[in-house]
Every structure is written in structure tokens, then in C-alpha cells.
Amino acid sequence: MPVLQELSLSHFKLEWTHSIFRLPLVKLSVRGVIEAQVLSTLGNMQQLKYLDIGGAIVLDELPITTLPSQPPRSVRLPHLEHLTVSGSTLQCMLLWMHLDIPLSATVTLEFKFDSTAKRDLDLRGPRDTTNFRFYTNVPSMETAQPPTMQPHFTLTISAASLDPRVYLDHFLYQLPLPHVQALYVGELDGWSSLKSHFNRFMTTLPNITSCHVTSAVKDYVEVLLTKRVEDQTAEKSQKKGRRTLQWAAPYLRTLVFHDVMHPCQDSFIKAVKAREKAGCGLDRVVLLNCTGVRESKVEILRKSLDGAEVVWDGIEREYEILSSESEDSYSIEPASEESDFFGEDGW
């Protein structure tokens, strides 16, 4: 009789001491109330390769206000290849911090709400989410969509989740990110006050070469391009208090702007020129579906990137043409009061 190796469960109350969890499972997917007993159960499932776990995670009955400074890593899963954890923010973080898994494993964390009440099993969450995707290899990033290559680590944050500074200042610092070469960041519109936090976090990615950003993140990138940080690899000067500084993200060579307003402002061009002059210039800038772009600014940017490439899809020019055509049509035949000027979606 074949031995069960794959198991998928979806129950409000899971009995983690059940004998079914003692089978040699290689793939486990569970949804429900995830209590502290899960840790000892998973600790006996050394053969797991795929783990998808989520729901109302309640590892501690007391409210969690802070995370441990050092991950406990009490559950060793030496053969795990794929991990997905979804649920309330701090409890989800805590569960991940208990797992000792190979650095080669692909990880997806989805923080969708903050309540740890057992009745709260709604994992749909708000539509507005922020996505961080970390890649140990450099994927093609020249499309408006996230790269199709499997990211090494994915973090999805609901707009209703905890203060985002928790992620940038604490949790993300604990991730094994030194070997990350590419980063995709999507939908940070509501985080305009977090530039300093974002750029401190970016210093944990010393080998990043490619970055794909959207919307308000463009302002963060301008700061990143001009930021200097202490060079931890340089020998300390004998002079007291003397520090050696280097550019943040010194190996950044490809930058993709998607759905960004005015990506070629003077401040950005100035930052690009400064990096170029210091020998840390960009090799490629890609502008996709951006608005407020002027061809003259794009040409200035091209000249600033000596020998590098600027790819622009010309989308702003198309908007201008459409706008001009629309104005002409309105001047010939004004819209009637009954016409729906914006359409059903209000655009």
C-alpha cells in the first residue's frame, strides 16, 4: 500500500498530535488555527520539502508587541525547498523565525492582517498590498510586470498590516540577503515618509545590481543613489574617528521605473551624474508606462549616462497625442450633458 506523502488540510481546529502528522510527508498544506503545538510537530517532519501554512496563527496567547532580537530557529527542516507562511503580521513573523531552513529554499511570507483572534480566518485582506521580491539571480526586468523568474524570497504586506517600519527597520534586517542581486518593489504609495527607513534597509543588499521600482519608490531611489554609507570591508584608519565611506548599493547598474510620475526630474539626473563621475554609474535605465516624461529630459539623461543605455517606451508622448486629438474633437463637437465623459470606471 502506498505511503501518503502529500497532505492538504483546511480546518478551523487542527489536532497537531494526530497520527497523520507522523507519516513521512514531503508536502504539507494547512489552513486553520495554527497553535504552538505546530512547532513540535514540524520538528518531527524532517523530510518535508514543501510547506504551505496559514490562517489564524497563535503561537503565543499573549499579544506580541516585539520580536526576539535573535531568531530562535527551534524547528529544523533540512530538506525544505519551498515555504509559504500567511496570516497575521507578528505571529507570521514569529513562526518564520522559528524555522531553520536551507538558504536555498524559496520563501513567501504574506502578512494580511494583525488580529490573532481564532475567529479571524479571512486571509483575503485588502486589495492594496506592497510586494518585495528578492532574487539571487538577475531576471529580465524590462517589462511592466514583475519578473517571471521565481524569486528567492517574497514578502507581501497588506495595507492594513502593522506599521511598515517594523518590516524595514527590524524584520527585513534579519533576512539572509547578502547574496541578493535583484529587487522588485511594488506599490509603496502610502509610505512616502519612509525614505530613510527604506534606504537603511537597502544597505543590507550590498550586491544588488538590478532594481525594479514603482510609483512613490522613485523618490526613495533618488536618495539611495546619493547616499554614502560606511565601508565595513575597508581597513579602519589609524586616525581616531576616521571612517571610510562608499556609495550605497555600489554595484547597482540597472534601474527600472514603472508607472512613475516625472522620473527624469533634475534631482534624479543630478544623482545619476554624481554616481557616474564617481565610477559607480548606471549601465541601463528603463522607463515603462511613466507619465510626465519629456523627450528633452530623456535626452539629458542619456547624455548623463556616458556609454550606457536609456530605454523609454514613449508612453507619455502617446498620452500627449491622445490629449491633443481629444481637445480637437471637443472643439468640433462638444460633449452633450447626457454623455458619460469619464466612462464607467471614472477615468
Image (cartoon, helix red, strand yellow):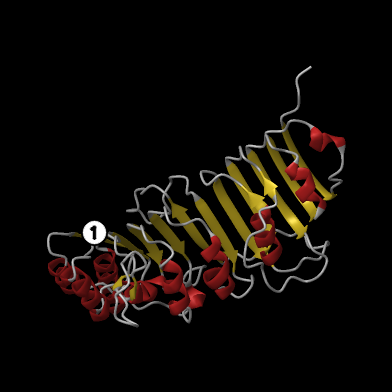
Please, is residue 165 above or below residue 281 in the view?
Answer: below
Identify the residue under disc 1. Answer: 284
Please, is residue 240 above or below residue 146 in the view?
Answer: below
Taking the image as drawn, is residue 339 in sight? no
Quarter of the rendering containing residue 301:
bottom left
Q: Residue type at mark 1?
A: Arg
Taking the image as drawn, is residue 69 in sight? yes
Question: Which residue is at a point 79% across and 52% down the rendered structure image?
Answer: 32
Name the image quarter holding the N terminus.
top right
Mark 1: few/some/many CA within 10 Å (<14, 14-19, 20+):
some
Please, is residue 215 above or below residue 252 in the view?
Answer: below
Name the residue nearer the viewer: 173 or 338.
173
Question: Which residue is at a point 48% across and 82% down the rendered structure image?
Answer: 193
Quarter of the rendering containing residue 252:
bottom left
Name the residue nearer the viewer: 286 or 17.
17
Question: Which residue is at a point 43% across and 59% down the rendered structure image?
Answer: 184
Name the residue nearer the viewer: 86 or 246.
246
Give the left or right position of residue 342, taking residue 60 as reference. left
Name the residue nearer the viewer: 299 or 338.
299
Q: Position of residue 189 (x, y in %)?
A: 48, 74
Name the image quarter holding the C terminus.
bottom left
